[in-house]
Amino acid sequence: MQSWVIGNWKQNPATNRDAMTLVDALVSAANTGIDQQKCQLMVAPSCIHLATVSARLQGSSLLCAAQDISTHSPSVGAYTGDCSAEQMADAGASWTILGHSERRQYHRECNNILVQKMSNALSQNLGIVLCVGETQAQYDAKQTLAVLTEQLAVIQTLLQQAGQVADCAEILAKRLIVAYEPVWAIGTGKVPTVDEVSATHEYIKQTVASFATPLANVSVLYGGSVNTANADNFAASPMINGALVGGAALNADSFLAIAGAFARAKA
Ligand code: 13P
């Protein structure tokens, strides 16, 4: 199974010039180093850099994702400050991250909003990297699986709303990745054990598969303080189909080293 290593650049870097420096380093190294059949690389720049970054990625093996899309319209409308799925696709994104814990925390994104965003993404043929994960308090209270059940329910709601469940499931099977990102592991240097992540991923896979048979092979990535020192350990688990990388994705060498770990492990 092909693995995925995705760089979520968040609100970085500060300038377009720095974004181009990073993407140039990735393109020149990635085209020689990483076997795309084994590990698909993708970067999610900030919205303002999306068009220039994706233009630079044309002809390379790297894909480009948006970090978010508008809830209110998949296309155009009077929604000041928003960028739609159609605009992101036009700027060169083929995927979008949705439901990142920073969006849930700072923008109060709830399941209703996420279902609408997922629907908007699919209407513009964007793939979806759906982020789920528990907070430290929920982890301490052993509520991880309950939290994930509640967050993953957006997939079932989307299928039900689509009416043609089987057709929608076939489309989602090609356009859905789940990223398990424990909130307490993001940017903290703290990580769960590989056994913990593997057990959680098994639960996510079973839950998603229970919604519709075509979703049985959904890829589940781990995110939260992935770095060059721990990537090999995560990559060794058959339950971990890749990584969603924040801080370490802002350096081309460390991002590509993480991708190399997954490419080797899944060889
Ligand atoms: P860090 O890798 O910086 O912990 O961020 C993870 C993340 O939030 C990726 O979406």
Image (tube, rainbow, N blue to C red):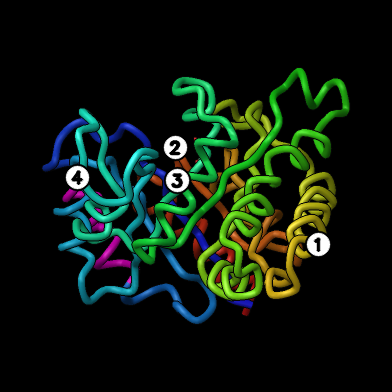
Query: What amino acid type should be assigned to the residue bearing mark 3?
Result: Lys
Of label 2 and label 4, which has the lower sequence position?
4
Query: Would residue 181 appear left or right of 137 to someone viewing this image?
Result: left
CA gap, disc 3 and disc 1: 22 Å
Crowding around mark 4 (Cα neighbors within 10 Å: few <14, some 14 to 19, many 20+) is many
Of the pair 63 and 116, the residue shown nearer to us: 116
Q: Name the residue under label 2.
A: 247
Query: What amino acid type should be assigned to the residue bearing mark 1?
Result: Ser
Residue 117's disc is 3
Which marked residue is nearer to the observer: mark 4 or mark 1? 1
Q: Name the residue under label 1.
A: 210
Residue displayed at 26% across by 55% down: 86
CA gap, disc 3 and disc 4: 21 Å
Query: What amino acid type should be assigned to the residue bearing mark 2?
Result: Gly
Q: Residue furthest front?
A: 163
Query: Would residue 164 appear left or right of 83 to someone viewing this image?
Result: right
Q: Is mark 2 within 8 Å of ligand 1?
A: yes
Residue 49's disc is 4
Residue displayed at 36% across by 55% down: 65
